[in-house]
Image: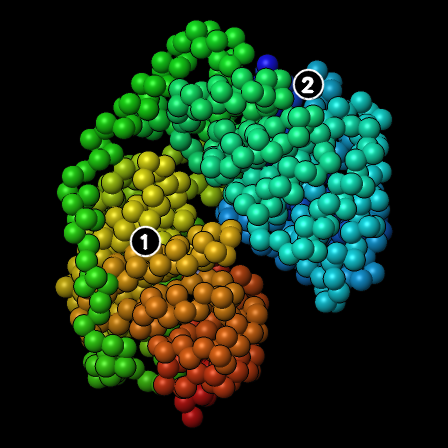
Amino acid sequence: MPTTHNLGFPRIGKNRELKFALESYWQSHSSQTELLATAASLRHTHWQWQQGLDFVSVGDFSFYDQILDASVMFGNLPARAQQSDGNTLDDYFRAARGRASKQDSACHCSAAEMTKWFDTNYHYIVPEFDAQTDFSLHAEVLLAQLEEAKQQNLNAKPVLIGPVSYLWLGKSKDGSDKLDLLDKLIAVYGQLLQQLAARGVEWVQIDEPILVLELSQNWQHALRKAYYSLQSAKLNILLAVYFGQLQENLQLACKLPVAGLHIDAINAFEEVEKVVTWLPFHKILSLGVISGRNIWKTDLNKTLQWLTPIYQRLQARLWLAPSCSLLHVPVDLRQETQLDAEIKTWLAFAVQKLAEIKVLAQALREGKNTVKSELADNAAAMQSKQNSTRVHKAAVKQACQAISCDLEQRQSNYANRAEQQREKLKLPLYPTTTIGSFPQTNQIRAYRRDFRSGVLSQNEYQQAMQREIKICVNKQENLGLDVFVHGEAERNDMVEYFGEQLDGYVFTQLAWVQSYGSRCVKPPIIYGDIARPAPMTVEWSRYAQSLTAKPMKGMLTGPVTMLNWSFVRDDQPRSLTCLQLALAIREEVLDLEQAGIGIIQIDEAALREGLPLRKNQWQAYLDWAVQAFRISANGVKDTTQIHTHMCYSEFNDIIEAIAAMDADVITIETSRSDMELLDVFDEFQYPNDIGPGVYDIHSPNIPTVESMITLMQKATQRIPAERLWVNPDCGLKTRQWDEVEAALTNMVQVSQTLRK
Ligand code: GLN
Ligand code: ZN
């Protein structure tokens, strides 16, 4: 019979209990004992929900991040975070966020770097290495959790990041080769496995997700070395790979001396057959048949159809699981009481996904008849989604089909446009601007809340927001900025705001997914063809512009970012959904222009996030992503200036695609990397205007005039002054007004000084 298991469960809790417990502890409002109690109760509940699986995962709980947990377990926490007071959880928080709590007596240390977990929106804490790094085992936390699970009578399978992926994911601080540390690290893993075996652990899951990436021979060899060394452990290793195809690593993965292999049968569906064939007979094969990355129900009947012959071949060697950890999906659909009833039948969150696994296993084990009603319900849901007129809109499909190259073309080239825009806008050299949002004060949040709950009428709400816009415009006037924004007071979130006004989007109330630490996001769901029934931002922008003689930037979220920060429908290519979004944004751009808005910014904060894991698939993605942006932006007149904004500092490798977007002005994050980013302009002549962010908005520190001038001087070495803008590196909504005013006062002075 197929064995069922899980690769990992979300730890935040269905009502984000962990978030609130963490933040309360960090604020010194609660004790560590209280925090630990919340964590234990969450684990208890989450295991409860996994009851009925043959194995539940242990070690997937984390107070901040599972890679940081591994750093603790292997004695590799940065020294600067460690205090000798024996409070290891505080050391851990210091590494994660620079400070354990408000009462932290230790001085702040710089938090470790954080970066994206493969192609997900989850961020992990980057391990730090140098040539001297030593490892030592600190498995107490994991062992204690193992004990907890046992007390709940569960068959526990510890989950660990593999040694080779752990090294890969980290950063060498002194330029030494991380692989030189492999032997030392393997030794500690060996000790760990020994301890687990001694506690009766039968199976351990070791994740080596880097097997879906392009690996050099050294790294491939490291994998061989690691697993040949660990094979003497007296327990079974299930090597887990997810998020993509193995491709040239397929044989390597099949041959490593472990007891079992897990592959992502959603993203690497085409490889299942090959792996079934290649895998040695003594190994079990775990197939991730339920997507751990999206919120759609699995087509169970279709899955059974392809799974049945595989089961006939593998029998007890077949295991079933979600494709990857369920960390990337919300917890429980049952809580969504306000969700449209029909759409709800199409969805499955973590709890529901585990139920799907059980149905599949039972159908294989005991025959489809034993789960007849479950399969029938599933078929009905699939049918309803396939045929729904809410999903399929003829007009949208026609508009997509009618897309031609000229939708992508501006009337003139950049040089020509720039000239016309100079003429019209009459901006000074080094124009100053901001990225869009201004502080989201408690007052603003209260207005939005009261409007939602009906306390404020539409009219009252509009007046309140207009007051806020006015405050924001006045402040910019006083600061002496050159290009204004309206401040985005009416927006809760840059994707949600637009999604709520577009057809084809649906919103949940509690479908939170962890982004990093205590931060969670609630991605909206694109379930159907996208259409824009009415203008979305025009009235706010028009009002804002009416208050000032300075140009007011219209502010939109771009199609690629809308896509990458949403759960996306799985019944058509992402590229097509993106084109639909592009057409909707294009209509908005043209309406803004019509309303007299001469500068329009289309944020593509998440363009980079959509890059496929494998470089050989990048170009295909960039092609349609850039096309979508161009379609959204390029319907305007030459005199209308298009801006875009990206908030990350590494785009050396996609600079050509960014140039191909052909925005008149791009603002980017550079301050944190000390303008390192601009190195790319030594080799690549970026043709258009650029605003390299001159200060880090994530920090409460007020940037000095000198520091910003230094940064701008670095920029002027690469980019002609006529094409440079001066701006912060991202939106200001998380900051306080006093910080913002002080920082922008200095920033405006930077421009004035540079002009002289
Ligand atoms: N216009 C948005 C803002 O200022 C951009 C946010 C972002 O880049 N993440 O808030
Ligand atoms: Zn940004």
Inter-mark Cα distance, 2 to 1: 45 Å
Q: Position of residue 712 (x, y in %)?
A: 49, 81
Q: Which mark, residue 266?
A: none
Q: Amino acid at mark 1?
A: Pro
Residue that mark 1 sits on: 559
**Location of residue 436 by image quarter:** bottom left
Residue drawn 57% across the image and 31% down it: 277
Kindly identify which residue carries mark 2: 154
Q: Quadrant of residue 502?
A: top left
Q: What quarter of the picture does the N terminus occupy?
A: top right
Q: State the image coordinates of residue 221 (x, y, percent, origin top left).
A: 72, 50
Is the residue indicated by label 1 positioned so its CB lies within 8 Å of ligand 1? Answer: no
Crowding around mark 1 (Cα neighbors within 10 Å: few <14, some 14 to 19, many 20+) is: many
Looking at the picture, which amino acid does disc 2 mark? Leu
Marks 2 and 1: CB-CB under 8 Å? no
Where does ligand 2 appear, by image quarter? bottom left
Please indicate, yes or no, whether residue 266 appears anywhere in the rendered image: yes
> Mark 2, residues whose alpha carbon is within 10 Å: few (<14), some, or many (≥20)?
many
Looking at the image, residue 709 lies above or below residue 630 = below
Question: Residue at position x 34%, y 72% from top?
Answer: 665
